[in-house]
Every structure is written in C-alpha cells, then in structure tokens.
Amino acid sequence: MTSGEIDKFFENLSSQNPDPKGELYSTNPFTLLVAVVLSARTTDKGVNKATQVLFKIADTPKKMLALGEDGLKKYINTIGLYNSKAKNILGLCQKLVMEFDGQVPNDLKALESLPGVGRKTANVVLNAVFQEPVIAVDTHIFRVSNRTGLAKGKTPLEVEKQLMKRIPPRWLLKAHHWLVLHGRYICKARKPLCPTCPVRQECHYPYKTKSLL
C-alpha cells in the first residue's frame, strides 16, 4: 500500500467513524486496565457482562484486593481462564498499591512490569487512557494490516513497528480503534464484507469477496 493509499485508507475510516471508541466497559484507568487483562482470549461482550457488576463493587486496586481471590472469581467465573486472570489481577493490584501509589502508570515498561500485562495490554491503556499515539496489535489489527497491505509482518511486534512508521501522524492517535473495529465488523477472518468495505479501493487483498452471500 502506497503512502497515498494509506492516507486515503484512514481518511475513509475517519469519515465513517470520526471518533472511534473501545468497546470494553470501564469507569476509570484502573478498571480499563483490569478489563483489558480480562479480555485476553475472550470477547468484549463477555467481559462487559461480568465487569458491569464487578466494577460497582471494586473500582480501585485496594477494593479489588479486599475481595480476595475467591471473591474476585465469583464475579469473573464466566470468563475464560478466570483462575489465572484472578491471580494476575490481584498481583497487579498489589504492585499498583506498593509501587505506584494505587495509580495506573503512564509508562510502557512500568505497565509491562505488572502481572498479566504484556505489550498489547500496555499499549491499549496508553492509547485509551493517556492518549498516546500507539497501537496495540491484536488479532484483528494483525489480520487487517497483513490482508490489506497496510503493514506486513510475521509477528505482532513487526506489524506494530510497520504501522508506527507508515501511518501519518494525523491519523495515529485513533488508528488503533479504527483498525480494531474494522477487523471486528468488516474485515472479518472468515467472511470479510468486502462489498460494503469503506476502504475497498485502497485494499490490496487479492481475494476480495464480490458479494455478501
């Protein structure tokens, strides 16, 4: 994809959705961090169903710690891998209280030092909470980037580096949400909705579907 095509790609996504938002329910930076940790290998819808109740009870690290592991599991036991996620969440809460005065840090390395938080989760928080122009490459972004020709790479990190280099600065802050939503609802893994795709002209995917059937 040429630089001109990339600019047009994001111009078209912007015209469709000028102010894209993430779909995970949260009430503050801490609850967003917890929601992203919970969302690994499961759907946002499933996470939101559990956190709508959980965050009314525990919306700070200290309140979450007060639940204890068994107490937390009662709220998240409908979510995949909830046993390990409960341990990680309580571990990150402990570290936030002990090392960061209970606040979510605005720093990639500090975020990655928290239990259960990898580069992708850290970048989601940096972008959504702190308005940092970074991109968290999940399965949707990885697929869209490689399929369309926007950014080629064999690993999420390779794709992330290409995206950061190739996306014009004026689009970079919102690019993460545009790409996630595009992959989730239009550029689907099995049946991409190419006929109604707003970036069809810029896309280099050689197997574009000709109809919705």
Image: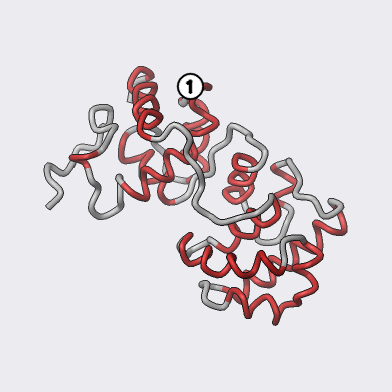
Would residue 52 appear left or right of 68 to someone viewing this image?
Answer: left
Judge whether 150 appears above or below 58 on screen.
above
Q: Residue at x 49, y 45 (%)?
A: 137
Q: Is mark 1 on a helix, strand or loop?
A: loop
Q: Position of residue 5 (x, y in %)?
A: 33, 22
Residue 185 pos. (x, y %): 33, 49
Visual colour scheme? secondary structure
The image quarter containing residue 150 is: top left
Give the answer, above or below, for where 2 lies relative to 194: above
What type is the residue that disc 1 sits on?
Answer: Pro
Q: Is residue 73 left or right of residue 151?
A: right
Q: Count the labels in the image.
A: 1
Instruction: Give the camera-side residue of 66 and 110.
Output: 66
Residue 129 in the figure: left or right of residue 81: right
Q: Considering only vertical position in the picture, is 212 above or below 53? A: above
Q: Specify the quadrant that holds the N terminus.
A: top left
Task: Please identify the quarter of the rendering in which residue 208 is found.
Answer: top left
Could you say where residue 166 lies in the image, as x and y percent from the top left?
Answer: 46, 25
Q: Dot 1 corresponds to which residue? A: 168
**Residue found at x 52% / y 42%:** 157
Horizontal side, residue 181 vs residue 83: left or right: left
The spot of residue 41 in percent (x, y) is 48, 63
Which residue is rendered at x = 51% and y = 22% of the image?
170
Category of crowding for the residue at label 1, using alpha-carbon neighbours closer than 10 angstroms: few (below 14), some (14–19), many (at least 20): some
Instruction: Name the residue nearer the viewer: 29 or 107.
Output: 29
Q: Residue shown at 81%/59% (left/top)?
A: 95
Q: In which quarter of the image is residue 65?
A: bottom right
Q: In the displayed image of the protein, which residue is found farthest to the top?
A: 4
